[in-house]
Amino acid sequence: SVTFLGYEIPIGNNLIFKHENNSKFTFGVEICEDLWAVKPISSDLALQGANLILNLSASNELLGKKEYRKELIRNQSARTNSIYAYASASLWESTTDLVFSGHCLIYENGKLLAESERFSLNNLMIISDCDLDIITNEREKNATFLNKKNLIEPQIIYFTFNETETNQLHRNISQTPFIPKTAQEINAACSEIINMQASALARRLLQIGANKVVIGVSGGVDSTLALLVSYETFKKLNYDIKGIYGISMPGFGTTHRTKNNAQSLCEILKINYLLIPIENSTLQHFKDIDFNENQTTIVYENAQARRRTHILMDYANKINGIVVGTGDLSEIALGWSTYNADHISMYNVNASIPKTLIKTLIKWHAENKFDILAREILYDILDTPISPELLPSNNKDEINQETEKILGPYLLHDFFLYYGIRFGFNIKKLALYAEFAFQDLYDFETIKQTLKTFYKRFFQNQFKRSCFTDGVKIGTVALSPRGDWRMPSDADPSAFLEKIENLKSIIKI
C-alpha cells in the first residue's frame, strides 16, 4: 500500500471492493492481459465473492483478435458466473507500430449486453443494465463456488517412448498460412485489415494536422494497396480525395502496362495523378558521380529508387503532406528494397502485410468495392509479374526483371516467414513442413534454394529494419525493431545456412 494525501491506498491484484449496504454489489479489477493468462486473476476474484469484474485494457488490434477477445470474455463471464465489463484504449493512442480500437464490451454470465463500435474517431461510451440477482442465483447453483480449497499439488509421473522419423504427416498444411481458408473468413479478414490500416493512417494524419498524402504509384500490387488504403482513409475522415497525390515516375525499365495501370487507377479514383519521368535526372546524376550509364550494376538500380524517393519526399513537403510507404512485410523480411529509398517513407500502411495477403486484399477490393472498369484494372495489376522495373528493356511491353525469378516464389518466402518467424521452427522442421505443403508444386531443390535465399537475405538486411518507418502491425508477424523484432544488424547466418546445405528430402517418391 501507499500513503497519498493522508489516505492509505491498498495496491495489489487481490483487492475486492464490496458495497457496505449491498453485499451483492462486489467487484474486482484485472488489467488487460491478466485475462489472457492460463489462470486469470478474475477467476480467484470471483471465487472470493466478486460478481462484477472490471478490466481496464490497452489491447492493440490484430487480425482476428476481436473475435478471440470476445470469446475470452464471454467464456470468463460464463465460467465465473459474473458480469464482465471490458474497456480498451481508443484509436487516439499512438499508431507508431500498433493501432488500438477502443473496443468496449459488457457480458453478463456469458451473454453479450453491450459492445462499442471499434476504430471510432469520437469518444464512445456503452451502457447496459446488469442484474446482480441473476449472477447470485447462478452462483448458488454452481458447486464450484462452494468449494474454495487451494489447488492440490500435482504428482509428477515420468514416461518415455521411442521417437521415429516419418515421411507422412496426418495434418493439412496450408500453402498460404497468412490467408484464411473460406470465402467467408477471407471477406471478414479483408474488411478488418483495411479498417485497421485506414484507422492507423487516419490517426497519424489527425495527429500532425495533415490532409494530403503522396504515394509513388508503380502499377504494382504494393503501391496499389497503399493507394486503396489511403482512399479508404480519406473517406473515413471525410477529407477531399483530391488530397491524395499518386505520382508515377517511369524509369529505364518501366513498361507501358504498369505505367498505364497506375494512371488509369488514379483517374478512376479521381485523385491527383502526376507523371514525373526520372530518366533524364538519373542520367544527370550518373554524370555528377562519374558513373558509366551502360553498367547496369546496383548503382544503376539504386539511383533510380533514390531519385523516386527524393521526388516523393520533396513533393510531400511542398503540399504539406506525408509520403505513404508501400513496402510490404515480405520485402522487409528479404530486404528487397533500396536503403534510404523505397525502404523509407513517412508512414507505411503495408509494413506487416505479406505479399500473398496483399494480392488477396486487392482481389477483395476488386470484387467488393468497385465497378467493372476498376475491377479490370485491379485484376490486370494482380496478373502483372512482380518486378522493381529497374533494368532497361528493349521492349517497353515486356518486363525485363521478374522478382520471383531472382528470389524464388513469394509463396515459399511467406511460408518461411510465417513458420520460421512466427513459430520459430528450426531449419529441418521448416523444410519438412514446406516439402509436405508444396510437394505438388515445387521440387525439393527449389524449396531448399529458396529457404537458403530467405535466411541469407533475412540476416544480411537487418540493418534496413533497424531504422524502420512507423507502420501499423496487422497480424501476428511484424518486424519493427521497436516491438516484435529486436535483432542485431551484424548477426551471422552461418549456422542456419550450414543446416540448409545439409538438408535431405524427407518425402520418398
Image (cartoon, rainbow, N blue to C red):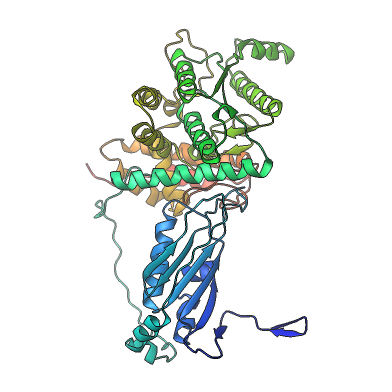
What residue sits 61% from the left and 18% below the top?
300
What residue is rendered at 70% in x and 28% in y?
317
> Residue lying farthest top?
394
Left of 194 or right of it: where is 184? Answer: left
Percent position of residue 87, x then y: 52, 64
Residue that lies at the very extreme toward the right in this rendered image: 5
In the image, taking residue 351 as reference, residue 187 lies left or right, namely left
User: What count of labels does the image hold?
Assistant: 0
Q: Is residue 505 visible?
A: no
Residue 417, position in %: x, y? Answer: 45, 45
Seen as rendered, the residue at the extreme left is: 509
Viewer-proximal residue among 302 and 223: 223
Q: Quadrant of residue 412?
A: top left
Left or right: where does residue 193 sit relative to residue 209? left
Q: Is residue 193 above or below residue 77?
A: above
Residue 428 x, y percent position in the rendering:
39, 50
Residue 257 spot, x, y in % from top left: 43, 16
Residue 14 appears in the picture as rendered: yes
Q: Nearer the viewer, residue 397 or 413?
A: 397
Q: Residue at x 43, y 53 (%)?
A: 425
Please name whichever residue, 263 or 176, is drawn nearer the observer in this view of the structure. Answer: 263
Q: Nearer the viewer, residue 360 or 116?
A: 116
Q: Quadrant of the N terminus?
A: bottom right
